[in-house]
Amino acid sequence: MKKVLVSLLATCIAVITLFPSTVLAVNDQFDNPDDDIVSQNESKEDLLNEELPDAPDPTGTAYILYDAQSDSVLMGRNIDQQINPATCTIIMTVLLALENLDMDDTINIDQSMYIGIPEGFETLGLTEGETVTVKDMIYGALLQSANDACLALAIKVAGSEGAFAGMMNTRAAELGCTNTNFISCYGITNGDAVNQSSARDMALILNECCDHEDFREIATTFQHTMQPTNLYADTRNIANANRFISTQAYSYDYYIGGKTGYADGAGYTQVAASDKNGRRLITVILGATNNETRYSDTIDLFEYGYSAFTTVMVEPGEFTPVYNDTINQINAALLDTKLCVMSAEMEFSTYFSTTAFRTIGGNTNSVDLSGVMIDVNADEQNFDIPILKTYTDGKTYIVGVLHLEIAVKDKVVEVNPTKKTVWTGLKNILLTVAGILILALILLFALIIFRRHRIRRYDDEFRNKNKML
C-alpha cells in the first residue's frame, strides 16, 4: 500500500447540517461477500466469479493464471489443492541458492550429493572430490533437472538435504504459501512421502524467482557449457529441456522463466512466467496428462490474460476532488456540534485487476459515507472509510481507505499558517503601509538624485556659454 498525506484545515465552517439526526453514519465494513462491493482483499480472487467469453480450459488437475502486479488470480481451477509439483520443486531450490550463495562460490562434491539418487534420474555425473561452481550447479538444476546439482546446492546452503527442506518450507511460508510442504530438494518420491504444493503457492514461488535477474537469464538460456573441472577433463553441455526455449513450436516471445516436471502419480507439471510491457503473468499447471498440451495451454492462458484482463494502476491524484468534497460534507454535517475534522489521510492499493472490456466504459470515484456513524457526544473518534472506483457496468472496487480523525473543537491545534485573526489583519495592514512608505522613500530619493543631476547639467551648460562669449 502507498500513502498520500493530505493537509487539512483544522477548522469547522458554519453551514447547515446534512443529516437530521444527532448520529451520523460511516461504513467501515470492507470484506463482505454478500454485498456488491469488491474489497481490496476480495479483489485478489473476485475474477474467478466472472463469466468469461471464449476462455481457455487447460487440461490438468489444477491450474492458475496469476497477475503479479495486482497479486490477483485471474483464472484458475483447484488453485489451493495440494498436489505433487514433481521437479518443478527445483525452482525453490534455485531460489534459496540465489539468495544464500554467490554464483562464483565453489562446491566440493561428496557422496551425499549423489549417492541416494534413484537409478534413471537425471544427473550431471558429479563425482566425489570434484570441485564445481554454484553457477554451473544452478544451470544444471534449472535447465536439465540434474538431481545431483540440486543436492550439491542444498548441502552447500544448509549442510544436509533435511535441513535444506526446512529452509524451503520456511521460505515458502514467508512468500505466503499455505499448502506447501517440501521433503526433497528435487522432487524425489519416497514411498508415500512426496513434496506437496498448490498452483497458487507455486505461482508465488516462481514470482519471487523472477525478481532475480540471474534466474531469468539462466532459465531462458538455450545451452550452457560447463568447463572442465579438477576431475572431469571434458566440457559438459547443459541443454535447456524446456520447450519454450528449446523448440520453435512452443517459442513464446514474452517468456521470462519457469520449469517443467514429471513424476509417476503426479503427471506433467509446469510453471511459467511472462512479461509483456512491464506486466508479469504467471501460469502453473499441475497434474496434466500430456506433455505437449501443457505448453500450448500455457501459451493460451498467457494470451488470454493479456487480452481479456487489465491491471489498473491506482492514481492517488485523481481522488483529490472527491476527498475535498467529502471533508466539506462532513464538516458541514458537524456544524451544530462540538466536533470537526482533526486530520485525514488517504491510503491506496497500488494495483487491481479487472476485465479489459469493463474499463472501456470509464469509471467514477467516490468515498462511501453511506453507513457512517459519528457519535456527536464523543470527544474523539477515528474512522476508516472506503474509497471506491465504480465502472459503468456497476462493478465497484474499494481501492483505498480514508483514515479520518474527528475531535472536539477545543482540542484542535491550529496548524494552518493562513488562518485569519485580529493580529493577522493588523499585521497585514502594517505591512502594507510599510511597503507604501518604503516605495515612497525610494521614489523621493530617486527624484532628488535626478533633480541634482539636471541642475549640475544646466550649470555646466551655462559656464560653457559664458566661456564662448
Image (spheres, helix red, strand yellow):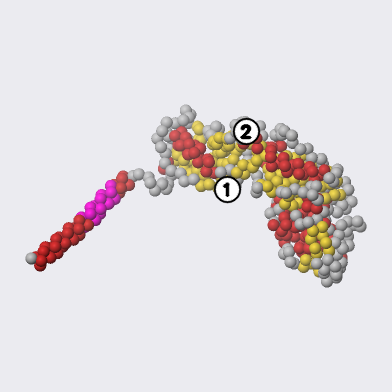
Quarter of the image that includes the C terminus: bottom left
Vertical relation: 407 (above or below) 127:
above
Residue at the image position 71 percent from the left and 37 percent from the top = 48
Q: Does the residue at mark 2 contact the one at mark 1 (Cβ under 8 Å)?
A: no
Image spot of residue 251 (x, y percent):
77, 49
Vertical relation: 223 (above or below) 73:
below
Of residues 223 and 156, which is closer to you in this image?
A: 223
Residue under label 2: 395
- Which secondary structure lies at badge 1? strand
Residue 71 image label: none
Q: Quadrant of residue 113?
A: bottom right
Residue at the image position 76 percent from the left and 44 percent from the top = 299
Q: Amino acid at mark 2?
A: Lys
Name the outermost residue toward the top.
Answer: 20
Q: CA distance from mark 2 to mark 1?
A: 23 Å
Name the outermost residue toward the bottom.
Answer: 230
Residue under label 1: 2
In the figure, is residue 441 to the left or right of 257? Answer: left
- Which secondary structure lies at badge 2? loop
Q: Amino acid at mark 1?
A: Lys
Of residues 371 and 95, which is closer to you in this image?
A: 95
Q: Is residue 437 magenta?
A: yes
- Write down the region rendered in magenta: 429-445
Of residues 301 and 285, which is closer to you in this image?
A: 301
Image spot of residue 153 (x, y percent):
79, 61
2 or 1: mark nearer the eye: 2
Q: Is residue 94 magenta?
A: no
Residue 183 seen in the current view: no
Vertical relation: 328 (above or below) 191:
above
Image spot of residue 86 (x, y percent):
83, 50
Image spot of residue 53 (x, y percent):
72, 33
